[in-house]
Image: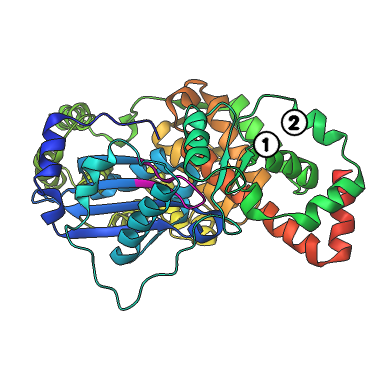
Amino acid sequence: MIKQVLSREEVSLLETGYFNSLPLHKCQINRDWKLTKKACVVLSRKLANGNICAAFYIIDLYCTGVKQVGFMPDLAPTDLFKKVLVIFNQSAYRMIDCEYSLAYQLIEDALDYAKGNGIAPDDNFSHIKHMLDAEPPKPAAKHPIEFGKNGKPFLCLSDDDDKLSYYLTQLEKHLGEGKYNYKSSLYMSESEDLSHYLNRWTAADWNDFIDEFDLEDHIDDYPVMDYMFKKIFDGYEDSEGLKLKLDNFIATCRVGFGQSYERTFSDLPGELDALESLIMYSQSAGKAECEKMLKQTLGYIEKWPHNIEFRNFQIILEASLGVGDATARLKQMTVDFPEYLPARVNYARALTLAGDFDEARKICGYKETLDEICPTRTEFSEREFLPFVHFMAYGYAQERKIYHAYLYVSMLAKVDPEIAEMGYDDQLLAYTNGSAIALLLDYIDAAKHNPDTKAVVLALLG
């Protein structure tokens, strides 16, 4: 998370107690915080305009306490996940609702623990703490929270972290030698070619690694995880047939980036002008503008009921405002307009995000490319291509068919290299990487407890 610079107005409103007087919207935390000893906490409150404000806290339970904080003074409830994704990266997919009392206690206890180690919280915490209630909540019992590792503060940081010197100085000053442990994380370390180093490991080395494997020690060692995944699962899935289909789509079909609505229009006067005005103003519209455009769109639907695009805009605007049931409306559109591909692929994406990938694939006839769904077409719009790729990649990642998922993710940059630069593939890639790590961890755990599985893993790694 990039360090945030708060405005004078934000600081003033925080410190006057305006925000912590607002009703609670929700509290969230990553479900694996006890295991990873890294808590990502989101506290959001309801604003009078229907939006929310939110505070973000990254907490290190091993040693440093409240490491980073962030604040969003006004955002739509539907935009909260996007902000969480930017700030927490892969942990965004492991967020669950939690009791406010847990979030409050976790923050306060982390502050106390870090203070005992001589470590101060993020500079902005003195302001953002005012998102918390002035008085602590009164739970029936305190939540069990463990700090440190093996009874000591445990600092795990890469050698190039700009706060490493500060942390080590404070620990030495306040605790002294032998009263804390420090480990240089492999993540982001460029001191050696890790692949070259791991390639020299023997079967005995890997055997010891698996027997001694501790998720707490290796959760941040993504280069090691990546190396092991490629070794163990290379060729694990029969994905060659899918790769040929996707490559053929890229070679023979065109994806247009920019709106394409001509197939849905008649020659009625004013119809195209009305839609183009919605497109133009929706790009940077705030809440008030969206409400105004939604009212206009409903009028256009009544005036031009045959035009599918206005119905699609209704769904987009309602989703931006946090009203209506977008999934239900998309489902109805697939019934009313079965040939309208944007509704079908967006409905499939909504089903997949809700955990029903099989039903999503059924909606698209179990086809694996857009030209299989629409065999008479060779041109598709971004409004068809992006949601289709998203739902296929998400779905295969859910099923832990990781190579299938990566093939769809890689399609984005192959079709248009600027997609990667604009970050359209970041969310997909983070989700797929998270699924890959989860699959690998399950496999390592199985190897620890099953000699036959271990023999297979050692053969692959060796």
Q: Nearer the viewer, residue 411 or 9?
A: 9
Query: Disc 2 designates what residue?
Result: 194
Q: Which mark is residue 400?
A: none
Q: Position of residue 44 (x, y in %)?
A: 24, 53
Say which residue appears at 30% left-offset and 78% top-offset: 140
Q: Read off the residue under disc 1.
A: 223
Q: Which of the 4 image quarters holds residue 88?
A: top left
Residue 429, image quadrant:
top right
Image quarter where the N terminus lies is top left
Q: Are marks 2 and 1 in contact (CB under 8 Å)?
A: yes
Could you tell me which secondary element the residue under label 2 belongs to?
A: helix
Q: Where's residue 100, x and y in %? A: 29, 63
What kind of residue is marked 1? Answer: Pro
Q: Residue 403 versus residue 133: which sits nearer the camera?
A: 133
Q: Which residues are magenta?
A: 57-68
Q: Amino acid at mark 2?
A: Leu
| Camera sees residue 81 | yes
Residue placed most toward the observer, 98 or 124 = 124
Across and down, in percent, residue 267 comes to 20, 30
View extreme (bottom): residue:
140
Q: In the rendered image, which quarter contains the C terminus?
A: top right
- Eyeballing the image, is 97 above or below 71? below
Q: CA distance from mark 2 to mark 1?
A: 8 Å
Q: Is residue 366 visible?
A: no
Name the residue: 15% across, 36% down.
10
Q: Residues within 10 Å of mark 2 (few under 14, many from 20)?
A: some
